[in-house]
Image (cartoon, rainbow, N blue to C red):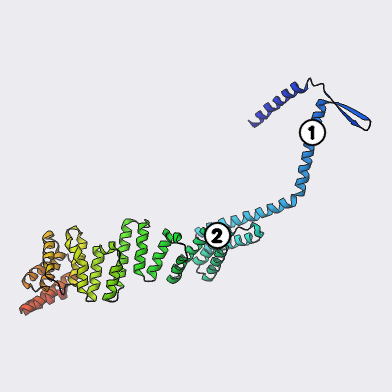
């Protein structure tokens, strides 16, 4: 198609030339020292065009000859840059293929090729990226000395903020792999406020704080991650609840437990399972009033809770039963009336009646609990032991012995 177009253009030029120059009778006279040369205007124009073309060709040829060394140098530099890029691509391929030793060798080869370039042709971010790749390969090979050397070189060569931030995030991840939570938290603290709120930075901070045994800080970080949709809704709820459990279990006395409870987020304190775990921990420190106070809001709205949440609340309430006030009886009886088939509520009511020394009613409620084999063994055993205590108060030693025997055989 291109040849046909050029053929038509050639025909057009020929037609224009024939129409223009065919009837041109002009002459051009050239004088030189007494000599005179007369040529036709057509010949002069043709010679002028050819001469200009020859002059332009000669100038270009001379320029190409003069610039040949420079162009050869540029070609050699371009070939080196191409070789460095090829080595980097090879290193990336080997790294993603889990051949870390080969990836490290390819990265070092890319560094040597790039290092042979003049200073003005070196790409600092390219060097930083290759150093990071070599460091990551060394980390996979458990070569910490070379990893730290390459990381230092990457940070010194990084010119863009993104490259430096990426290097620090990688270093924090390596520190977590080394179980060095303090170093990981220090590296994360060096990041800017915007970078520190990114999902990857928050994930690393969560891992570091959990590794460093700071459950409250881990809980706050996990809540930020959940806010940024770093987890699914179900996973976020489970993680937040587990971290709240860790924070509560980390308390070493009643005062510390109260401080932890106040530092929990409102959403955590409204979680029945978290409140039940806190009450169980309060029972360990004999802080029964605090435990019952944390459980009270849930018992006032027991109808809104699921079966597993009611069971956890009942187990926790029994543990903080000493010193139970009479107002709790009405609350528990109302819960049993709403859920007459829930044996966990009957279990809590039976122990509350026993605590208030209403032994007849307590025995009836607890006997229903001991006969239910779907209840946990610990729940049934505690009920048998309470029945033994009631029998002792009644002076019925035979029944007391049977209750102790029934508690002993439970497994």
Q: Measuring from the top left, give residue 219's x and y in whole percent.
A: 34, 65
Q: Which residue is mark 2?
A: 129
Label 1: how many Cα within 10 Å (few below 14, some 14–19, many 20+): few
Q: Measuring from the top left, give residue 330's x and y in whole percent.
A: 11, 65
**In the drawing, does residue 367 fall left or right of residue 113?**
left
Q: Is residue 365 visible?
A: yes
Q: Measuring from the top left, give residue 84's x and y in whole percent.
A: 61, 57
Disc 2 and disc 1: Cα gap in Å? 55 Å
Q: Measuring from the top left, give residue 278's x and y in whole percent.
A: 25, 69
Residue at 76 percent of width and 43 percent of height: 60
Q: Which mark is residue 50?
A: 1
Q: Quadrant of residue 398?
A: bottom left
Residue at 34 percent of width and 68 percent of height: 216
Where 310 sits versus 5, above or below?
Answer: below
Residue at 41 percent of width and 59 percent of height: 199
Residue at 78 percent of width and 36 percent of height: 52
* Number of on-image labels: 2
Where 1 sits versus 288, above or below?
Answer: above
Instruction: Please tell me which residue lies in front, 201 or 35.
Output: 35
Q: Quadrant of residue 55?
A: top right
**In the drawing, does residue 238 fall left or right of residue 144?**
left
> Residue reaching furthest right?
34
Q: Is residue 411 visible?
A: no
């Amino acid at each position: 198609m291109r040849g046909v177009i050029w053929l038509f253009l050639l025909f057009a030029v020929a037609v224009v030339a024939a129409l223009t120059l065919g009837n041109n009778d002009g002459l051009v006279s050239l004088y030189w020292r007494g000599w005179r040369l007369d040529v036709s205007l057509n010949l002069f124009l043709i010679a002028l065009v050819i001469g200009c073309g020859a002059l332009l060709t000669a100038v270009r040829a001379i320029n190409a000859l003069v610039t040949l060394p420079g162009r050869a140098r540029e070609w050699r530099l371009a070939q080196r840059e191409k070789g460095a890029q090829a080595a980097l691509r090879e290193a990336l391929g080997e790294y993603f293929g889990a051949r870390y030793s080969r990836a490290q060798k390819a990265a070092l080869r890319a560094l040597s090729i790039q290092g042979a370039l003049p200073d003005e042709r070196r790409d600092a971010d390219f060097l930083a990226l290759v150093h990071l790749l070599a460091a990551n390969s060394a980390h996979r090979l458990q070569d910490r000395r070379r990893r730290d050397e390459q990381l230092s070189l990457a940070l010194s060569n990084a010119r863009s903020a993104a490259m430096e931030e990426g290097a620090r995030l990688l270093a924090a991840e390596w520190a977590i792999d080394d179980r060095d939570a303090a170093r990981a938290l220090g590296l994360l603290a060096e990041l800017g406020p915007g970078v520190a709120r990114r999902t990857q930075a928050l994930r690393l901070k969560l891992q570091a704080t959990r590794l460093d045994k700071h459950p409250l800080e881990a809980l706050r970080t996990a809540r930020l991650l959940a806010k940024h949709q770093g987890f699914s809704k179900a996973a976020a709820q489970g993680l937040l609840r587990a971290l709240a459990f860790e924070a509560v279990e980390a308390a070493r006395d009643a005062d510390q437990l109260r401080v932890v409870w106040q530092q929990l987020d409102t959403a955590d304190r409204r979680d029945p399972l978290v409140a039940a775990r806190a009450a169980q921990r309060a029972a360990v420190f004999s802080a029964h009033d605090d435990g019952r106070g944390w459980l009270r809001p849930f018992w006032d709205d027991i109808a809104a809770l699921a079966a597993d949440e009611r069971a956890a609340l009942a187990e926790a309430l029994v543990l903080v039963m000493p010193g139970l006030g009479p107002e709790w009886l009405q609350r528990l009886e109302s819960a049993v009336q709403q859920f007459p088939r829930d044996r966990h509520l009957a279990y809590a009511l039976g122990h509350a009646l026993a605590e208030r020394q209403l032994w007849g009613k307590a025995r009836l409620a607890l006997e229903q609990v001991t006969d239910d084999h779907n209840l946990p063994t610990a729940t049934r055993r505690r009920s048998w032991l309470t029945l033994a205590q009631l029998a002792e108060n009644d002076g019925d030693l035979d029944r007391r012995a049977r209750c102790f025997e029934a508690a002993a055989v439970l497994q």
